[in-house]
């Protein structure tokens, strides 16, 4: 079930809110959220609910044992628990990919081929698996965090606002909120505002960019020229940002409506001054997870220059692989790691001109790597060459489909160009300075507050209208 669906907005969410606030008891409220989370997850693939339930039972049992200070084999049990969680993730997400690699190697050396196993991947398994690992790691470090209430741990792992696409919530950040949190009208209002903003990002912006991007890129390499290649490339960069950050906004807003405070997951990544800064701003919860549970345990930057480089490559290899079982994701991650290592070797400067150049180069590097992320390894070089006016078909003899190019041009209409300009503007935090400048003026502040609510109501109406019209509504991070 998508947050950006009529089913969720009109039926599911209002029903859960009514039941939740009708009961004052915290235990029963948690039970309502747990039941709602399982119903939410079961909407798409009911059978995978049992997989998630089994994983909760197993991690609950391991956590209880890790919480016993007298237990001597705590490190062994932690390793077993982590490997078990990774094994389940591997089977559903990476087994088919691994079989293809093995089959390719065997066929290369003329051995008998093996059968490639392709399993349906449970939605959100990458996210809730990482949360289970976070729970075990936190309990290992601090046994007092072991959750003795099965329902509370179940709620942490399955909490529907962040279940299928994050942000990845680490146990020590939320364990106290599960048992003791304060709901209020003010908190609910803030959460509702955040949800509307996220919904608008997804429905009004990301979906519009997705339509143009998918129509162009999926039409075939010979169907478009340099101009349309740039339109599709920029559209995808904006789509993936507003799609994913919009979902995170909705998740944070929904959690706030139920009294939970989730950490931020995005901070204007396209305003980054470097690749390192980009990863401080993009998918922050994933970056922090790999930093704390992979990079630092490997030794971080404490074991010399070459070990630090190796550790970074391991982290970014894992980051790429986490996004998908395909070589383009691995290359995408490794490319980010290589750029980060390269820029750290450059001399530091505080000159404004060089700082601006670095920001521009960072932005273009990120955008070009999104081409690899979306289109795979086969077409990426062709598309990037085309972005610079070099037609790959010149070297291959492919015939350009001029008629198809003209048809695709119709998608670049006035509405799309306006939305493109809005998306570019909203990708940078320029408005913060305006808000800070007028915050001390009482009358202007009141006017801006009224304008904000007017805009939010308008956006919500537009979102409902767009969804009711069955507009294009894909979601990128379902597959991760």
Image: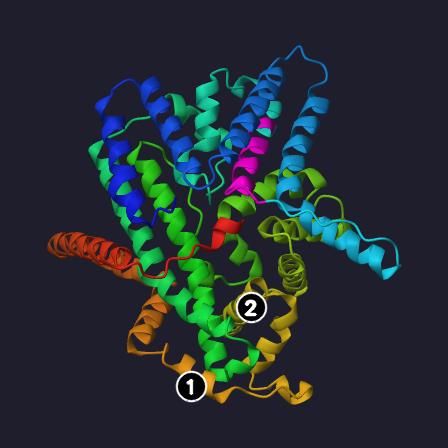
Could you say which is closer to the camera, residue 1 or residue 233?
Answer: 1
- The answer to whether residue 190 is seen in the rendering is no
The residue under label 1 is 406
- The answer to whether residue 183 is seen in the rendering is yes
Q: Is residue 69 above or below residue 465?
A: above
Image quarter in which the N terminus is found = top left
Residue visible at 62% across and 19% down in the picture: 66
Q: Is residue 160 above or below residue 81?
A: below
Magenta span: chief secondary structure: helix
3 sits to left or right of 440: right
Does the magenta segment cover residue 34?
A: no
Q: Quick one: SS at disc 2?
A: helix
Could you say which is closer to the camera, residue 60 or residue 66?
Answer: 60
The residue under label 2 is 371
The stretch in magenta equals 120-136
In which image quadrant can residue 25 be found?
A: top left
Q: Position of residue 30 (x, y in %)?
A: 36, 23
Q: Residues within 10 Å of mark 2 (few under 14, many from 20)?
A: many
């Amino acid at each position: 079930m998508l947050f950006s669906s009529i089913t969720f907005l009109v039926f599911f969410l209002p029903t859960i809110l009514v039941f939740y606030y009708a009961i004052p008891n915290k235990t029963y409220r948690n039970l309502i959220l747990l039941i709602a989370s399982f119903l939410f997850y079961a909407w798409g693939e009911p059978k995978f609910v049992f997989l998630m339930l089994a994983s909760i039972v197993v991690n609950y049992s391991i956590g209880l044992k890790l919480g016993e200070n007298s237990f001597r084999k705590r490190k062994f049990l932690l390793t077993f628990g982590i490997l078990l969680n990774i094994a389940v993730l591997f089977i559903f997400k990476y087994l088919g990919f691994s079989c293809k690699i093995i089959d390719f190697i065997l066929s290369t050396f003329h051995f008998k081929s093996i059968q490639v196993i392709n399993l349906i991947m449970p939605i959100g398994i990458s996210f809730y698996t990482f949360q289970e690992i976070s729970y075990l790691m936190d309990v290992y470090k601090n046994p007092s965090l072991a959750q003795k209430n099965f329902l509370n741990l179940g709620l942490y792992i399955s909490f529907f606002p962040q279940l299928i696409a994050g942000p990845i919530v680490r146990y020590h950040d939320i364990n106290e909120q599960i048992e003791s949190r304060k709901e209020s009208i003010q908190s609910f209002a803030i959460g509702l505002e955040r949800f509307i903003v996220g919904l608008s990002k997804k429905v009004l912006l990301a979906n519009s960019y997705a339509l143009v991007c998918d129509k162009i890129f999926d039409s075939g390499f010979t169907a478009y020229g340099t101009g349309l290649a740039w339109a599709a490339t920029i559209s995808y960069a904006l789509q993936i940002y507003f799609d994913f950050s919009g979902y995170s906004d909705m998740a944070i807003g929904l959690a706030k409506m139920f009294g939970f405070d989730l950490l931020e997951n995005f901070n204007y990544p396209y305003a980054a001054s470097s690749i390192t800064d980009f990863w401080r701003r993009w998918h922050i919860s994933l970056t922090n997870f790999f930093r704390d549970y992979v990079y630092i345990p490997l030794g971080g930057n404490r074991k010399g220059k070459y070990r630090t480089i190796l550790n970074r490559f391991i982290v970014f290899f894992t980051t790429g692989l986490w996004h998908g079982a395909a070589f383009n994701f691995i290359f995408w991650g490794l490319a980010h790691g290589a750029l980060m290592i390269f820029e750290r070797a450059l001399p530091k400067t505080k000159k404004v001109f060089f700082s601006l150049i670095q920001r521009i180069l960072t932005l273009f590097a990120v955008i070009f790597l999104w081409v690899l992320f979306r289109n795979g390894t086969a077409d990426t070089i062709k598309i990037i060459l085309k972005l610079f006016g070099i037609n790959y078909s010149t070297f291959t003899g492919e015939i350009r489909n001029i008629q198809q190019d003209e048809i695709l041009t119709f998608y670049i209409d006035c509405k799309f160009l306006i939305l493109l300009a809005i998306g570019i503007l909203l990708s940078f935090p320029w408005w913060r300075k305006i808000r800070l400048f007028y915050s001390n003026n009482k009358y202007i502040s009141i006017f801006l507050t009224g304008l904000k609510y007017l805009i939010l109501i308008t956006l919500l109406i537009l979102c409902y209208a767009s969804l009711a019209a069955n507009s294009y509504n894909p979601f990128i991070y379902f597959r991760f």
